[in-house]
Image (cartoon, rainbow, N blue to C red):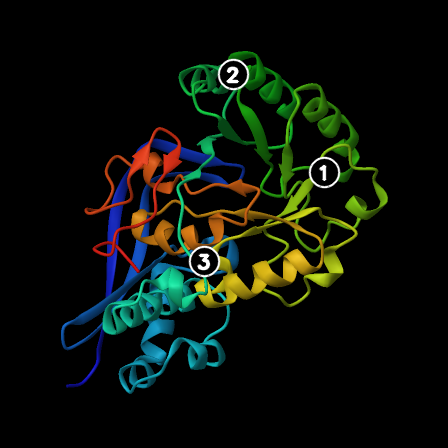
Amino acid sequence: MSRSLSIAVERFPIAGTFTISRGAKTEAVVVTATISEGSATGRGECVPYARYGESVESVSAAIETVREKVEADCDRHALQALLPAGAARNALDCALWDFDAKRLGIPAFQMAGLHRLSPATTAYTLSVGTPESMGEAAAKAAHRPVLKIKLAGAGDPERIAAVRAAAPDSQLIVDANEAWAEADLETHFAACAAAGVALVEQPLPAGRDEALARLKRPIPVCADESVHDRAGLAALRDRYDAVNIKLDKTGGLTEALALAAKAERLGFALFVGCMVGTSLAMAPAMLLAAKAQFVDLDGPLLLAHDRAPGLVYDGSIVHPPKAELWG
């Protein structure tokens, strides 16, 4: 019986609007790869990201370029050489993990060498807005143990203070999405320190973040846009204290696990993150959550509705995926 690959573009409305420093969106547009053979079917979801030059069309086309090899029995290890790190490889890699788990009757976490999967506490993301609107959003989410604040540069100290005042007991992570200027680093870091922020994510643009090596960092700083896979990771040791591992950046779970292992060896703390997608995109990342000091797998919580079956969220506690979803 021959193996088949299908590609689908799916749209999921966001609850309200999700806004970061680069713009706003009202829906999550994902590309899903499905690999089937006999009774075994595996799925993987990716979120094309314009920041990395990706679109639904380009990602779908990239997957099509390897269709023949995937349908001719390409495995996830061979896939690493066929496509670069990015969303297209992520969808296929995660589909192959799921397919192998279903075909062999072995959970994906066991295939990855893990003994078990446990629930994790995820951050909950607040879109960037005025200090007043972000304070109101923080007040509504103040019961959540970890809040991740999207920032935009000018006015960020006021945003941080407003969120802290509205959510005095939550751990705070701030994510500038490359929006800070070198001249503002000390002021912004001071605002973070005053609010007891636990982590600052990607304050400066990737490739223009040398100032972080010269600055005495009062708060741990996490690389996001500056790190995609293992290549170049060692060069970031003087600039960052943690790395944000997203499967859409690494090109799937295979490279994500390797990146996590190398990052730990180099002394980085681990942050497991996501794009705004459904539970199918979050499920493989759960295999990384146990080792991570910070987990941000709240994509489904930001949607008007998730795919079914989805992950089970109990407040900010996200439970491991059932086999019907993935793995």
Number of the front mark, 1 or 2: 2
Looking at the rendered structure, the kind of residue marked 2 is Ala
Number of the front mark, 2 or 3: 2
Q: Identify the mark nearer the N-term, 2 or 3.
A: 2
Which residue is disc 3 drawn over? 248
288 left or right of 229 in image? left
**Quarter-of-image position of residue 190:** top right
151 shown above or below 277: above
x%, y% of residue 305?
23, 38
Residue in front for this viewpoint, 317 or 154: 317
x%, y% of residue 61?
34, 72
Which disc is residue 181 wearing?
1
Residue at position x 55%, y 41% from top? 294
What secondary structure is marked by label 2?
Answer: loop
Which residue is disc 2 drawn over? 167
84 shown above or below 124: below
Looking at the rendered structure, the kind of residue marked 1 is Ala
61 shown above or below 109: below
What secondary structure is marked by label 1?
Answer: loop
What secondary structure is marked by label 3?
Answer: helix
